Image: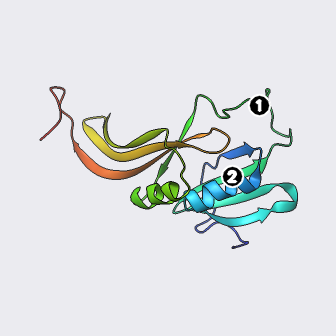
Amino acid sequence: MADSLPQGGFAPLVPELDVRDLARSLTFWCDGLGFTIAYERFERGFVYLEREAAQVMLNVVNGNWTTAPLEPPLGRGINLQIAVRSTAEIIARLNALDWPLFRPLHDAWYRAGREEVGCRQFLVQDPDGYLLRFGESLGRRPFSPDGPAS
């Protein structure tokens, strides 16, 4: 376990997620998703995690940032998109924990201007219900309003 700043410094946007059971969340995020602890304040119920360039903070619910009652699943209305080099290793880790996927692994193409961006992705919920979408790049292709490019 490291106890230093995240590799490459702090990301420009880092979500901090309230969790109910830090040990259970760490099992999911570290053993299941392959994140590592950059630094922690266990006595305060806080950890700062990283995986590749993605970063997330987990904090045991303490009321400091609570704007409304927290009812499961937490994070309703948002999914966190996390880019990874490969989804296969994460799927294997989650299978080892017998953790269900919210949406199975699939390929998707999204129009971005005059091209489409491909993503091999799956969705999973963490122990508190936060929806996470992991995706690896399938590259880009020209967009055709008449259907997929060849």
* Mark 2–mark 1 CB contact (< 8 Å): no
Foreground of the two, 76 or 72: 72
Which quadrant of the figure has residue 80?
Answer: top right
User: Disc 2 designates what residue?
Assistant: 25
User: Disc 1 designates what residue?
Assistant: 70
Amino acid type of disc 1?
Leu
Q: Could you tell me which residue is drawn at 61 percent across and 45 percent down? A: 126
Q: Is residue 27 above or below residue 8?
A: above
Tag shown at residue 30: none
Q: Which mark sits nearer the N-terminus, 2 or 1?
A: 2
Q: State the CA–CA distance, disc 2 to disc 1.
A: 16 Å
Relative image position of residue 98 (x, y in whole percent): 53, 52
Farthest-out residue, left: 150
Q: Could you tell me which residue is drawn at 55 percent across and 62 percent down? A: 34
Q: Could you tell me which residue is drawn at 88 percent across and 60 percent down? A: 43
Amino acid type of disc 2?
Ser
Relative image position of residue 64 (x, y in whole percent): 85, 40
Relative image position of residue 131 (x, y in whole percent): 56, 39
Q: Is residue 150 left or right of residue 37?
A: left
Relative image position of residue 57 (x, y in whole percent): 69, 52
Instruction: Kindly tell me whether residue 10 is visible in this rendering.
Output: no
Quadrant of the drawing holding the C terminus: top left
Q: Is residue 113 above or below residue 97?
A: above
Task: Name the mark nearer the viewer: 2 or 1.
Answer: 2
> What colour scheme governs how the chains and residues are painted in the rendered image of this protein?
rainbow
Number of residues whose C-alpha sits closer than 10 Å to that of mark 1, classed few (under 14), some (14–19) or many (20 or more): few
Q: Is residue 5 left or right of residue 53?
A: right
Circle 2 SS class? helix
Q: Is residue 137 left or right of residue 80?
A: left
